[in-house]
Amino acid sequence: MDIESRLGPVLAVAAANAAAVDTEGVFPAASVAELRRSGLLGLTIPTDEGGLGAGPEVFSEVVSRLAEVCGSTAMIYLMHIAGTMPIAAAPPSAYPNLLSELADGTRLATLAFSEKGSRSHFWAPMSRAEVSADGIRLNAEKSWVTSAGFADVYLVSTQTAEAASPTESDLFVVLGDDPGATVGPRFTGLGLRGNESSPMRFDTLVHDSERVGDVGSGFATMMGVVLPWFNLGNASVTLGLAKSALDAAVRHVSGANLAHLDSRLADLPTIRHRIGKAGILLAAQREYLAATARKIANPADDTLMYVLGARASVNDAALEITDQAMRVCGGAAFSKHLPIERNFRDARAGHVMAPTSDVLYDFYGKAMCGMELF
Ligand SMILES: Cc1cc2nc3c(=O)[nH]c(=O)nc-3n(C[C@H](O)[C@H](O)[C@H](O)COP(=O)(O)OP(=O)(O)OC[C@H]3O[C@@H](n4cnc5c(N)ncnc54)[C@H](O)[C@@H]3O)c2cc1C
C-alpha cells in the first residue's frame, strides 16, 4: 500500500476530530488509533524491521499534511518518530521486538527529555542515574512529555552515574506500563491542546540492556539522531499549520462579500498584499524545508546549518503567516468561525519547543563565527 492510501483515512479521522480535540483539550485517541492501523508509525523504520523505510523528505510531507488537519495529532506523530529513530539506530537488547512493534503500530513512542532544572536546554538533564546491585535507578522529573500517559514507550534521558557534566548522559527505554512512570498534574495549553504534554516522573529500575547505545552516548544521540528528525518534523508541523491558515484565509477573502460595494474582501488591495506576502513567505519556507530534508537524507558539511536554520526560519514564518491570516479574515477569524485561530495558537508551540528559536539563532550565529555550539 502506498503512503497516500495509508494517510487518507488518518487525515479524514483527524480532520473530523480536530475541533473537538482542541476545544476539549483531549488526546486525539481516534486519530492515533487510525495512525496505528495505517502502518505510518513505522514510516521511517527500515523495511527489514517491518517499517516502510521512508526517508526525511517523505516524513516531512506526512507530518505537514497531518498538521494541516490537526496540529495535536501531527505533534504526537512527530514525537513518536523522534523517539523511534534513536531506537532504530541502537536497539536495546532487552526488547528484541521493540522496533517491529513500533513499526506495526503496537507501540507509540515519545521523548522524555526536558527537565525543570535545565528548562529548554534538553541536552543537559539534571537527573542522575544511580547504580545499585539490582540495576540502574532512574530518578527523573520531566517537565513536559508529549503523549504523557498515552505512550507505550518513553525514551528517558538522564546523566550517567559517574557524569562530570550534564552532557554525559544516557537514554533508556521505559515502557508505558512501568509502575515507576507516573504522570504529573496536567496543564491547559494555549495551543496543541490535544497532545497531552504533561510532567512525568520516572522512578524505576532499568538495566544496561534497556539503554539506547553505549554508556554516555546520550548527548551524541540527542544531537546526531534526535535533533535532525525533531527539527525537521517540528518545522514541518508549523509549515502545515501555516498552510492551513493561509488556505482558509484565501477561501474566506475570495468568498466574503461587501454587498454595498458589490465586491469581495479579495478585491481590496491591502488584503491581496497581505495574502501575497504570506504566500511568498510560505513558498520560500517550503523550499528551505525541502532542502533540509534532502540534506538530512544525504548528509554534507552544511547539514547542521540547515537543521538549525530551517526550523528557526519556518517557526518564525508560521507566526507571521498565521498572524496575517487572522488579520485578513477579521472577525470571522477572531470569532472562531474559521480554523485559523486554532492554527494561530498551535503554531506558537513551534518556537517554544527545545531548542527554542532564540537558541537556534544563537547556535546558527555561533556556527557562522566558527564557535563551538556547547
Ligand atoms: C507543546 C509542547 C510539547 C512538548 N513536548 C515535549 C516532549 O515530548 N518531550 C520533552 O522532553 N519536552 C517537550 N516539550 C518541552 C520543550 O521542548 C521545552 O523544553 C519547553 O517548552 C521549554 O519551556 P521553558 O519554559 O522551560 O523554556 P525556558 O528555557 O525557560 O525559555 C524561556 C525563554 O528563554 C529563552 N532562552 C533559553 N535559553 C536561551 C539561550 N541560551 N539563548 C537565548 N535564549 C534562551 C527561550 O528562547 C525562551 O524565550 C514540549 C513543549 C511544548 C510547548
Image (spheres, grey):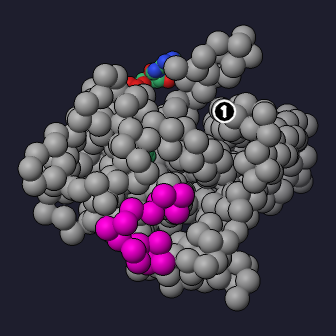
- Report which quarter residue 59 is drawn in: bottom right
Asked if residue 6 lies left or right of residue 142, the reply is right
Asked if residue 135 lies left or right of residue 325, the reply is left
Query: For the point 43% across and 33% down, which residue is it?
Result: 123
Which residue matches tag 1?
A: 308
Secondary structure under tag 1 reads helix
* Relative image position of residue 211 (x, y in whole percent): 34, 54
| Magenta-drawn segment | 87-102
* Relative image position of residue 51 (x, y in whole percent): 59, 76
Is residue 25 in view from this perspective? no
Query: For the point 19% across and 64% down, which residue is it?
Result: 178
Classify 82 as above or below 363. Answer: below
The residue most toward the left is: 133
Of residues 282 and 135, the one nearer the viewer is 135
Classify 281 as above or below 35. Answer: above
Kind of residue sitting beneath label 1? Leu
* Relative image position of residue 338 (x, y in whole percent): 61, 57
Of residues 285 and 306, the one nearer the viewer is 306
